[in-house]
Image: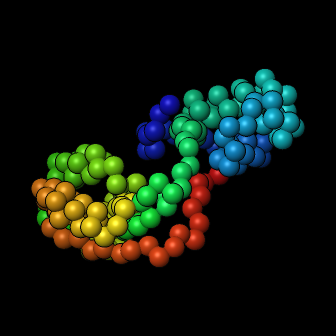
Amino acid sequence: MPSSHSDSPILTDIDETDRRLLCLLQTEARMSITELAERVNLSATPCARRIKRLEDTGVITGYHTKTDAQKLGYPLAVFIAVSMDRHTAERFEQFERKVQSFEEVISCSIVTGRTEDYLIKVRVRDMAHYEEFLLHRLNRIEGVAQVHTSFELREVFSRSVV
């Protein structure tokens, strides 16, 4: 399934049934087609067709297992704002490729309204793990000029758009 966001057109013919399906899939993705269909008052075949259309148009980009970072041994969430030394396509592409290869990085966004260029979120085991990540990997990416770190005290909520 495609994971592109800017290459696909906005799907404007999403109705209330599609929205209910998306809500159910985001919270209970392992639900059977039969159960999904019942919950949105459809029969199984039209329900499956709707889901297939949402996948084909790129509205549904994948199915994921949600995990508990604490229980997996990664209790520390860190936001890192990164400034680049030059604003060139090559420099940004190189940074994005490299940072995507780090398993600790769970999100990376180019941002505006700040002096920094990127905001990344990482998950680490402890401060020693964070120090190793910062000093021996992130800061060694060519073009990283400055970083600013903020530690997450508690995630209040996280959700997807429906």
Query: Quarter-wise, where is residue 78 in the image?
Result: bottom left
Residue 6 against residue 137 in the figure, above or below? above
Near-viewer residue (22 or 9): 22
| Residue 51: quadrant of the picture | top right
Q: Position of residue 118 (x, y in %)?
A: 30, 63
Q: Is residue 1 above or below residue 68?
A: above
Name the residue rendered at 19%, 71% in the picture: 146
Q: Is residue 122 left or right of residue 2?
A: left
Q: Is residue 62 above or below residue 107?
A: above
Compared across the picture, whether 89 is left or right of 122 comes to: left
93 above or below 33? below
| Image position of 78 (left or right of 158) | left
Comparing 151 with 119, the one in front is 151
Residue nearer the viewer, 68 or 50: 68
Q: Is residue 13 visible?
A: no
Could you say which quadrant of the image residue 77 lies in? bottom left
Toward the top, the furthest residue is 45
Visible residue check, residue 139 = yes
Q: Residue at x 56, y 49 (%)?
A: 66
Residue 55, how many percent across, how many down? 59, 32
Depth check, front residue: 5 or 22: 22
Name the spot of residue 149 as percent of width and height, x first: 30, 73
Q: Residue at x 83, y 40 (%)?
A: 40
Residue at 71 percent across and 26 percent down: it is 49
Number of residue marks: 0
* Colouring rule applied to residues: rainbow
